[in-house]
C-alpha cells in the first residue's frame, strides 16, 4: 500500500488536521449550525410529553362536557339512570381510537383515570371493576369545571403512566385489563 492510497498522503496528515481545526473554528460556521440546532430542538422529546398531557387534559374536559350534555327535557342522554356512562370515553379501549388517541396514549390515560378513581375520595369518573365500566361522580357542570382547573393531569402522572404501559412487562402481564392484548 502506498502512502497516497485512498486519496491522501500520510505525510500530509498533520497539515490536514490543522486545516480541519481551522475550518471548525471559523465564525461563519455558526450560521450553518443554527438550522441544525433548530432542527434538533424540533426533534426534542422534551416537549412531547407536555403536548401529550395537554392533549389528554383537553380530551378529559371534552368527555366531561359530553357526559353533562342535557336534552331539552333535562335528561342526560349519555348517562344511564344509575350514573353509568353510555358513550365511549377517551381512556377506554373502545373510546381511544374514536377520540383520535393512539393506543399507548389511551392506555396511559386509562392508568391515570383508574388511579384517580382509586385514590380520590370524589373522582370525576369512578371505575366499577365488577362491570368493567365507568360511572359519573356527583359533580355539577360548575364543580366539574373547578375540578378540571384545580386537578389537571400532570406531567409526572403522564410519565409514570406512560412508563407503566410502555414496558414489555406491561404488555405481557397486564393484558386485557388495560387493553394491551
Image (spheres, rainbow, N blue to C red):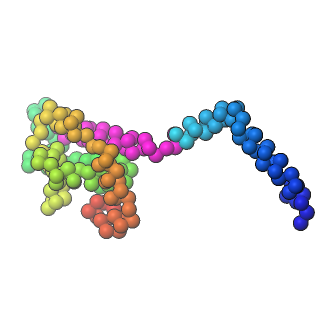
Foreground: 162 or 71?
A: 162
164 displayed left or right of 113: right
State the residue in front, 27 or 176.
27
Quadrant holding the C terminus = bottom left
Residue 98 seen from this side: no
Does residue 148 appear left or right of residue 105 in this picture?
A: left
Residue 3 screen position, x and y as percent? 89, 60
Percent across and percent down for residue 76 are 14, 39
Q: Residue at x 9, y 42 (%)?
A: 138
Q: Return the residue found at the far bottom.
A: 173
Which quadrant holds the N terminus? bottom right
Residue lying at 19% horizontally and 41% vertically, measured from the top left: 67
The region drawn magenta spans: 42-71
Residue at 21% in and 36% down: 150
Q: Position of residue 39 (x, y in %)?
A: 57, 39
- In the image, residue 176 lies in the stretch drawn in magenta: no
Residue at the spot x=36%, y=47% of the render?
101
Q: Is residue 41 visible?
A: yes
Main SS, magenta region, reads helix
1 vs 127, nearest the viewer? 1
Quarter-of-image position of residue 55: top left
Q: Quadrant of residue 79?
A: top left
Vertical side of 100 occupied by 175: above or below: below
Amino acid at each position: 500500500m502506498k502512502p497516497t492510497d485512498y486519496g491522501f498522503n500520510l505525510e500530509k496528515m498533520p497539515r490536514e488536521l490543522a486545516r480541519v481545526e481551522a475550518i471548525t473554528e471559523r465564525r461563519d460556521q455558526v450560521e450553518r449550525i443554527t438550522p441544525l440546532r433548530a432542527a434538533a430542538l424540533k426533534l426534542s422529546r422534551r416537549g412531547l410529553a407536555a403536548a401529550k398531557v395537554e392533549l389528554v387534559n383537553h380530551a378529559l374536559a371534552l368527555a366531561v362536557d359530553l357526559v353533562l350534555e342535557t336534552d331539552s327535557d333535562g335528561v342526560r342522554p349519555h348517562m344511564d339512570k344509575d350514573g353509568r356512562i353510555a358513550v365511549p370515553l377517551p381512556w377506554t379501549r373502545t373510546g381511544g381510537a374514536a377520540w383520535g388517541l393512539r393506543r399507548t396514549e389511551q392506555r396511559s390515560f386509562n392508568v391515570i383515570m383508574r388511579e384517580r378513581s382509586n385514590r380520590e375520595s370524589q373522582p370525576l369518573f369512578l371505575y366499577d371493576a365488577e362491570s368493567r365500566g365507568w360511572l359519573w361522580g356527583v359533580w355539577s357542570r360548575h364543580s366539574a369545571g373547578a375540578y378540571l382547573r384545580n386537578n389537571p393531569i400532570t406531567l409526572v402522572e403522564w410519565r409514570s403512566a406512560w412508563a407503566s404501559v410502555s414496558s414489555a412487562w406491561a404488555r405481557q402481564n397486564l393484558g386485557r385489563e388495560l387493553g394491551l392484548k
